[in-house]
């Protein structure tokens, strides 16, 4: 079994003692991604739609650095700070997974780091050897 960590400048740097992703053989486990601009490290202070788009772009960047992509995601976990935002978050999410979407859980949490509205983590298959 081969295990290694991923670090890419195309996604926000980890804000604690964790990796952006861990690869074990052909499976990629991403850490939860926040709506942070990878260039500035600042939270995108906007609507749930804008934050969801930024989060999914960050997930995509980490997956690509891992040798995977959104088409090979097996499972997503979404954390949102307010279930009232579920429909709006879901509409943006559907743009990223238009056909055969992955399995998914979505839970409301009391609070997210940096007071973000959404955080998303993924499990995917690597497509590059």
Image (spheres, rainbow, N blue to C red):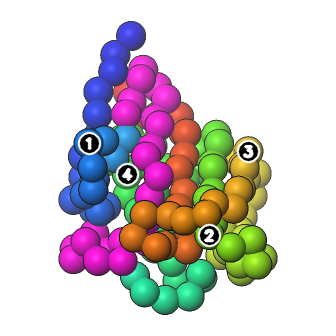
Quadrant the N terminus occupies:
top left
Which mark lies nearer to you, 4 or 1? 1
Q: Residue at x 44, y 58 (%)?
A: 33
Q: What crowding class fits label 1: few (fewer than 14 Cα within 10 Å), some (14-19), or many (20 or more)?
A: few
Q: Residue at x 41, y 23 (%)?
A: 24
Q: Residue furthest top?
A: 1
Q: What crowding class fits label 3: few (fewer than 14 Cα within 10 Å), some (14-19), or many (20 or more)?
A: few
Q: Is residue 61 magenta?
A: no
Name the residue that disc number 2 marks. Answer: 81
Residue 62 — which label? 4
From what the image shows, is residue 50 above or below residue 22? below
Q: Residue 112's x, y, as percent?
A: 50, 64
Residue 17 — which label? 1
Is residue 31 visible in the rendered image? The answer is yes
Q: Quadrant of residue 66?
A: top left
Whole-angstrom CA distance, mark 4 to mark 1, is 17 Å
Which mark lies nearer to you, 4 or 2? 2
Dot 4 falls on a residue whose secondary structure is helix
Whole-angstrom CA distance, mark 2 to mark 3, is 21 Å
Which span is picked out in magenta? 22-43
Whole-angstrom CA distance, mark 1 to mark 2, is 23 Å
From what the image shows, is residue 97 above or below residue 69? below
Dot 1 falls on a residue whose secondary structure is loop
Which mark is first along the chain, 3 or 2? Answer: 2
Which mark is first along the chain, 2 or 4? Answer: 4
Name the residue that disc number 3 marks. Answer: 103
């Amino acid at each position: 079994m081969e295990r290694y960590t991923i670090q890419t400048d195309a996604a926000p740097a980890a804000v604690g003692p964790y990796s952006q992703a861990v690869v074990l053989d052909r499976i990629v486990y991403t850490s939860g991604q926040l709506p942070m601009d990878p260039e500035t490290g600042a939270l995108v202070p906007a609507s749930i739609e804008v934050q969801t788009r930024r989060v999914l772009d960050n997930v995509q960047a980490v997956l690509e650095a891992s040798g995977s992509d959104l088409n090979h995601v097996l499972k997503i976990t979404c954390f949102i700070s307010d279930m009232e935002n579920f429909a709006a978050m879901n509409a943006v999410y559907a743009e990223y997974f238009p056909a055969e979407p992955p399995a998914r859980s979505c839970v409301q949490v009391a609070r997210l780091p940096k007071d973000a509205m959404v955080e998303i983590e993924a499990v995917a298959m690597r497509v590059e050897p």
